[in-house]
Image: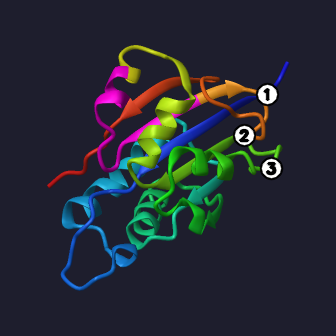
Amino acid sequence: MSPLRRLVVLRHAKSARPEGVPDHERPLAPRGLRDAPAAGRWLAQADCLPDLVLCSPARRARQTWELAAAQMGSTPSVRYDPRLYGADAEDILEVVCEVPADVGTVLLVGHNPGLQDLILLLAGEALGGTLQRAQTKFPTSAVAVLTWRGTWSALAPGVALLTDLAVPRGEE
């Protein structure tokens, strides 16, 4: 039987839009600085600790990962992949399909609309109302968990089960 794989998708937390700052360098907003650690706590409590992190190199994505990681108590290897910045679902899938065979859980940190489209592309089935929620909205700091049996290189549209969708929020 093929091993169970898990792709955990984390949209970066709420970013600021300071005047004169290029999109790639936009930092997290105060709400994002609160929500990113909450996402890390959710990942730890849901036992969604990654073996590998694939992260967009955009500042807001890197900050989201760093703040979330501080709540997890583990230090997986991280790849900041420029192909994830501004990527569509098909381009993101290409990056994910390159994951080494010995990796069980990948955390993908990036941007919409690519992440939401990727979830909808991969999810052939879903638990509860997760698919309808993912179709409606995938807000900042949202987390989706997709599982399937097989290899990373064989990940394809419709093969995954969307098992969870959460939107962790920090305290004000």
Q: Residue at x 49, y 63 (%)?
A: 85
* Label 2 residue SS: loop
Q: Position of residue 127 (x, y in %)?
A: 46, 15
Q: Is residue 139 magenta?
A: yes
The amino acid type found where label 3 is placed reads Pro
The residue carrying mark 2 is: 104
| Closer to us: 119 or 163 | 119
Magenta residues, as a range? 132-146
- Looking at the image, residue 45 lies above or below residue 82: above
Q: Are marks 1 and 2 in contact (CB under 8 Å)?
A: yes
The residue carrying mark 3 is: 100
Residue 45 seen by the camera = no
Q: Which mark is residue 3?
A: 1
The quadrant in which residue 143 appears is top left
Q: Which mark is residue 105?
A: none
Q: Are marks 2 and 3 in contact (CB under 8 Å)?
A: no
Q: Outermost residue toward the bottom?
A: 20
Q: Outermost residue toward the left?
A: 172
* Separation of residues labelled 3 and 1 (CA atoms): 13 Å
Q: Position of residue 7 (x, y in %)?
A: 59, 39
- Identify the image quadrant of the C terminus: bottom left
Dot 1, how many residues are within 10 Å of its Cα: few (below 14), some (14-19), or many (20+)?
few
| Closer to us: 142 or 21 | 21
Dot 2, how many residues are within 10 Å of its Cα: few (below 14), some (14-19), or many (20+)?
some
Q: Earlier in the sequence, mark 1 or mark 2?
A: 1
Q: Is residue 143 magenta?
A: yes
Q: Residue at x 50, y 43 (%)?
A: 9
